Image (tube, helix red, strand yellow):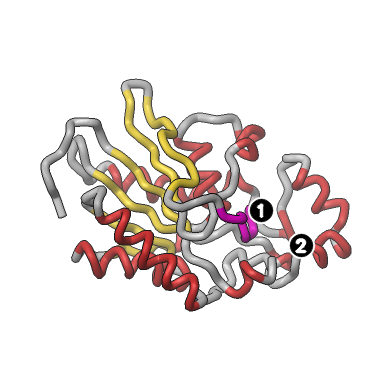
Amino acid sequence: MNAARTGRGRRIVLWRHGQTQWNLEQRFQGTTDIALTETGIAQARRAARLLAALNPDAIVSSDLSRAASTAAELAAITGLPVTHYEGLRETYAGVWQGLTHTEINERYGDQYAAWKRGEPVRRGGGELETEVADRAAPVVLAAVDKLSDDGVLVVVSHGGTIRTTIGRLIGLDPVSWESLGGLSNCCWSVLGEGVRGWRLTEHNAGTLPEPVLGDDT
């Protein structure tokens, strides 16, 4: 779907997956492979119709099913293939995965409080946010580098991974990444390429305000 371009430069659309049951239960998903709910599938279909209007040139996705199923809805409309990458998975959160925020606070209160303060924490013995950016940002940059000067890349991933990737690409200090608010299910953010590098042009776009339900709450 390569319509006439406007010469505005390359863009990266970072699209969060649709709703899962664990989102509704406020359980940490991390790298656990949880499927979309029926509502999540409907969210993906609606968002895909909107994103198709951007005339994307390529789609890359996390290989976890909630992201892959979301990406498949856009692929069905655009006819583009989806390339799946383990590097775009959500943050691995160790023993926190499968627990609700309340359960985590009860069992790992000090660690949970440190994370909420923005301190670098291996949640549940898992990954640091900077390590997530270390694996995800190169995948995104390698994919966008294959596009023309005004190409559009859609990246289908997870709330925490998207936030850390945005922070890395726009050059924020990791201590400031928390200042980027979370994404609602099936909403997206857009990075545009400027003369000084990537900049955030849209954030949590795509719908009327919805609660942010997920690991990155």
Q: Tell me if mark 2 has few (under 14), some (14-19) or many (20+) residues whose alpha carbon lies within 10 angstroms of its own.
A: some
Which stretch did the figure color magenta?
Answer: 210-217
Residue 167, given in percent of the width and then of the height, sits at 53, 37
Residue 50, given in percent of the width and then of the height, sits at 32, 55
Instruction: Choose between 140 and 216: the one closer to the eye.
Output: 216
Residue that carries the numbered disc 1 in the rendered image: 217
The secondary element bearing badge 1 is classed as: loop
Name above or below for residue 50 compared with residue 81. Answer: above
Q: Earlier in the sequence, mark 2 or mark 1?
A: 2
Q: Residue at x 64, y 58 (%)?
A: 215
Instruction: Choose between 138 and 91: the one closer to the eye.
Output: 91
Horizontal side of 127 relative to 167 (left or right) equals right
Q: Residue at x 64, y 69 (%)?
A: 24
Position of the N terminus by quadrant: bottom left
Q: Main secondary structure of the magenta part?
A: loop
Q: Is the Cβ of the residue at disc 2 closer than 8 Å to that at disc 1? A: yes
Given the image, on which type of amino acid does mark 1 rest? Answer: Thr
Residue that carries the numbered disc 2 in the rendered image: 101
Name above or below for residue 168 compared with residue 89. Answer: above
Instruction: Choose between 179 and 143: the one closer to the eye.
Output: 179
Residue 97, given in percent of the width and then of the height, sits at 68, 68
Q: Residue at x 74, y 70 (%)?
A: 99
